[in-house]
Image (spheres, coloured by chain):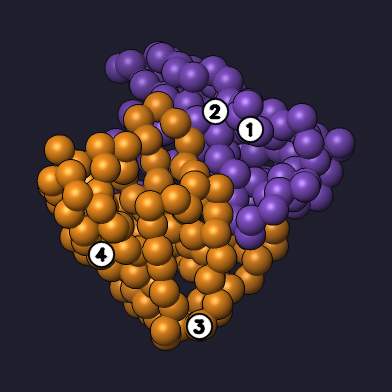
Amino acid sequence: NAGVTQTPKFRILKIGQSMTLQCAQDMNHNYMYWYRQDPGMGLKLIYYSVGAGITDKGEVPNGYNVSRSTTEDFPLRLELAAPSQTSVYFCASSYAPPQIDKQYFGPGTRLTVL
Amino acid sequence: SQELEQSPQSLIVQEGKNLTINCTSSKTLYGLYWYKQKYGEGLIFLMMLQKGGEEKSHEKITAKLDEKKQQSSLHITASQPSHAGIYLCGARVSGGGADGLTFGKGTHLIIQP
């Protein structure tokens, strides 16, 4: 199994541009998550999904959108990129809810908005 | 305010020495996780604790969750260079709305030869 994969690994955007961060998992996990990690800070939850067709906001959803059309894929869309969105983005997945099952993390996407 | 407080923020330890990292919450913790992150990489799962008083060990790393489920500690015995990295605690916190994990800011561990 490849586990959780993320593309791209690095990206530089100009203010106002848009992009989609890709995330895929091959473990047939129901739950998928997007986190961002700012320097010196813990990870903060952006969006999560408990299954195909179901998504919900996390702690810091503003400026982002997600979709979950399949069990495997959970892309994160940035519209009108802003410098405040410069961060490292991690996708994660789990079979069951976070209080009973560990999350598997992807390698991350490092995004810079200039 | 940060729901999960980790201490210390950074730690420099001589190789072979023992060390402890703490993770404290003002609320009850459910599904407490310890992850390790190497600089510039993703998170690697270390251990999960669910029950108050639970203790788990893997190789030279031991994690405990106190009886009240509001604090966890990670102890490394006879540290090695391979232990260097950022240690993050993550948990489902009581009263948390979203179905994800709350994370501490991390503890940067440096092992001096």
- Residue drawn at the location 34% of the way across and 69% of the way down: A75
Amino acid identity at mark 1: Leu
Q: CA distance from mark 4 to mark 3?
A: 18 Å
Q: Is residue A67 left or right of residue A99?
A: left
In this picture, residue B66 sits left or right of residue B80: right
> Gap in Å between the C-alphas at discs 3 and 1?
30 Å
Decide: few, some or many residues near mark 1? Use Cα within 10 Å; few <14, some 14-19, many ≥20. many
Q: Are marks 4 and 2 in contact (CB under 8 Å)?
A: no
Estimate the spatial distance between the alpha carbons at disc 4 and disc 2, rounded to whole Å.
43 Å
Numbered disc 1: secondary structure: strand
- Looking at this view, is A99 or B37 the one in front? A99
- How much space separates mark 1 and mark 2, taking CA atoms? 24 Å
Which-is-in-front pick, marks 4 and 2? Answer: 4
Say if labels 4 and 1 share a chain: no
Where in the figure is residue B5, as x and y percent of width and height? 62, 26
**Image colour assigned to chain A:** orange
Q: Residue at label 1?
A: B4
